[in-house]
Image (cartoon, rainbow, N blue to C red):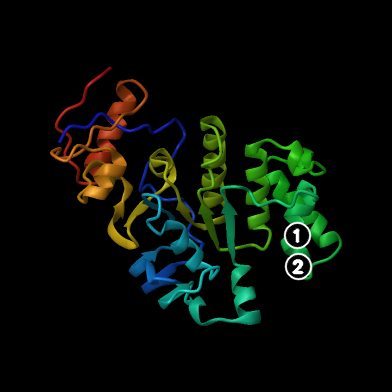
Amino acid sequence: MAVELVDPRPGVNPPNSGSGVVGGASIRVDGLSKAYTVRSGDVAALEDINLDIAGGEIFAIIGRSGAGKSTLIRCLNRLERPSAGKVWIDGLEITQLEGKELRAARRRIGMIFQNFNLAAQRTAFDNVALPLVLAGERGKRIEAHVMELLDLVGLADRRDAFPAELSGGQKQRVGIARALATAPSVLLCDEATSALDPETTSSVLDLLQSINRQMGLSIVLVTHEMSVVRRIAQRVLVLDEGRIVEQGDVATLFTAPQHPVTRELLRVPPDADGAWLRVAGGPDAIAGAVSLLQANGIAVESTRHE
């Protein structure tokens, strides 16, 4: 196998290195299926999904458009009701909950969206406070908590700004703060960086990694950006036509993909034993990446400089 090494940027944890804090909720999915009824009959969006996500893990879900990625992540917090199967969040079977119990469980599952989903007529402060207001919190407790969250995401000085006055990255930071308002143990990210430029994407990923380390949150992210997976995920699952076709730790899957869909997503030639991966940096960066791959049992036959 030949490797031309993938971009571990300075100061970023390499894949599979762990978050340093394990305090988030574990997630278990058993036999999950989801079908939609249309005029011509039932259309399967997900079929027999089984997976386990450890507490405090950053876990990525990738696949082509229409593979079922967003449907799967929305089944984890019951925004979509599965047609069959079960989902446990930290031992609680969320698929059987209704009404008050479901609303209480959802408060422990934060979610951020591609298009931010901010209320246009509310300030940054009021957007972050909204989940707390809906949960019945009032007064000084809201003030203190919201300011703490805005400070965490670097927007304390923009508390009175409306969404139209914020950049895309700032809007997503407000979305992250809002998702953290109810002290969740799981954070779901549905294409959270897809609408952002590369520099802003990098800063948002830094923030998510920091939150993962400081709070021990479990993070599940759906993305079509392979650089995002390389940058922060520890394990990755590949979906195709509603089924899991491959999953494993990032280092192994990105350097030795087995399924044709994974190879296509990573743009690996079908006759390649592995992958050429690119890393920015000099000899030290290359040596570090080679050590990481070898530590995960991946043979590196050659390297090259450009």
* Image-quadrant location for residue 145: bottom right
Q: Is residue 107 left or right of residue 286?
A: right
The residue carrying pointer 1 sits among few (fewer than 14), some (14 to 19) or many (20 or more) residues within 10 Å by Cα, namely some
Q: Which residue is mark 1?
A: 130
Residue 5 lies in quadrant:
top left
Q: Nearer the viewer, residue 203 or 271?
A: 271
Kind of residue sitting beneath label 2: Leu
Name of the residue lying farthest toward the front: 39
Density class for disc 2 (Cα within 10 Å; few <14, some 14-19, many ≥20) is: few
Residue sitting nearer the eye, 202 or 287: 202
Name the residue at 26% across, 19% down. Answer: 305
The N terminus sits in image quarter: top left
- Which residue is located at x 75 percent, y 63 percent? 132
Q: CA distance from mark 1 to mark 2?
A: 6 Å
Q: Position of residue 241 (x, y in %)?
A: 32, 59
190 lies left or right of 295: right
Q: Which mark is residue 276?
A: none
For numbered disc 2, what is the local secondary structure? helix
Vertically, is 100 above or below 116?
Answer: below
Q: Percent from the top left, x then y, of residue 119?
A: 74, 52
User: Tags 1 and 2 in contact by the CB under 8 Å rule?
Assistant: yes
